[in-house]
Amino acid sequence: EDPAIIAKLYEKGKLKPEELMEETPPSNHFYILKSHGSSALGWYNSNSGFIENIEIKNIHGIHPRNAEQHFAMHALMNPNVLLTTITGSAGTGKTLLALAGALEQRSNFKQIYLARPIVPLSNRDIGYLPGDANAKIDPYMQPLWDNLSFIKNQFKESSKQYKKIDEMVQTNKLRIVPLAYIRGRSLSNVIFIVDEAQNLTPHEIKTIITRAGEKTKIVFTGDIFQIDTPYLDAQSNGLSYLVDRMHSSPIYAHINLEKGERSALANTASQLL
């Protein structure tokens, strides 16, 4: 791009779409503008009709490490975006960003729900696991607890933020539950994060979204190339279906995270194995 365009975006905070392209972009579309060593991040706001600058420093102790993570954080924090999908391979930060975004907005919602479908690996039935219902389910929910613990540990134990997260869990303001618990419920005034959504069918995705009441925000995260159920593939799973059908809606945003940020070892395994 012309360096003057990038300078204008920083100075004015917005650009007319025709300054960058011939056609009107889709709602909530994100852009990386680059020119001779300078760059800027922007998104198309269909309400204002402008491409606007994105600046996010951190959300609940989590700092975005690349452009796509900035985009994801922006979508999560945008009150006009009621449905967000975040895709990407292992270690790109999908669940962590979704959870951090929810915690940052906790005062705007009655509850935060984190859910994931229970899909036993190697098709081993969950009923054969030892213990009561909670003991059987806990191993499947552990990745969500791990992400919550990571966010909590960005703060000192004596800090208000650290104690607040524990308090939210104890008072059920933040709940980590298997997805089956949501069936039949009406979810009003909540942020609802569904992890591992690539293991859901299109019908299940629709069932979840139609549970949404007033003031509810839903986030689906997943990796469409890591499917654990034998009946779905990268094209037929519910997450891919949702991205394909919702892309033109002004209340929807989609971000694909490409760069792994977990560790060099995790990135190498993701690429080579």
Image (cartoon, rainbow, N blue to C red):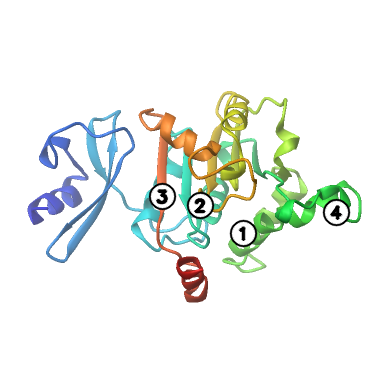
Judged from this view, the residue extending furthest toward the right is 131
Q: Is residue 192 visible?
A: yes
Residue 214 vertical placement versus 132 (above, below): above
Few, some or many C-alpha atoms within 10 Å of disc 2 (few <14, some 14-19, many ≥20)? Answer: few
Label 3 to label 4, Cα distance in Å? 34 Å
- Judging by the rendered image, the residue that carries numbered circle 1 is 147
Residues tagged 2 and 1 counted as in contact (Cβ below 8 A): no
Earlier in the chain: of badge 3 and badge 4, it is 4
CA distance separating discs 2 and 1: 21 Å
**Residue holding disc 4:** 135
Mark 3 element type: strand
Q: Is residue 223 depicted above or below 28 in this figure?
A: below
Q: What element carries label 4?
A: helix
The residue under the point 68% across, 43% down is: 117
Give the CA separation, mark 4 to mark 1.
20 Å
Q: Position of residue 87 (x, y in %)?
A: 47, 49
Q: Which residue was labeled with disc 2? A: 225
- x 81%, y 49%: residue: 125
What residue is pinned by disc 3? 256
N-terminal of the pair, mark 1 or mark 3, is 1
The structure residue drawn at horizontal position 51% and vertical position 52%, both measured from the top left corner, is: 225
Q: Which amino acid does label 1 sit on?
A: Asn
| Earlier sequence position, callout 3 versus callout 2 | 2
Q: Distance between the residues labelled 1 and 3?
A: 19 Å
Picture coordinates of residue 123 (x, y %)?
74, 51
Q: Which of marks 4 and 1 is nearer the N terminus?
A: 4
Q: Which sits in the foreground, 219 or 148?
A: 219
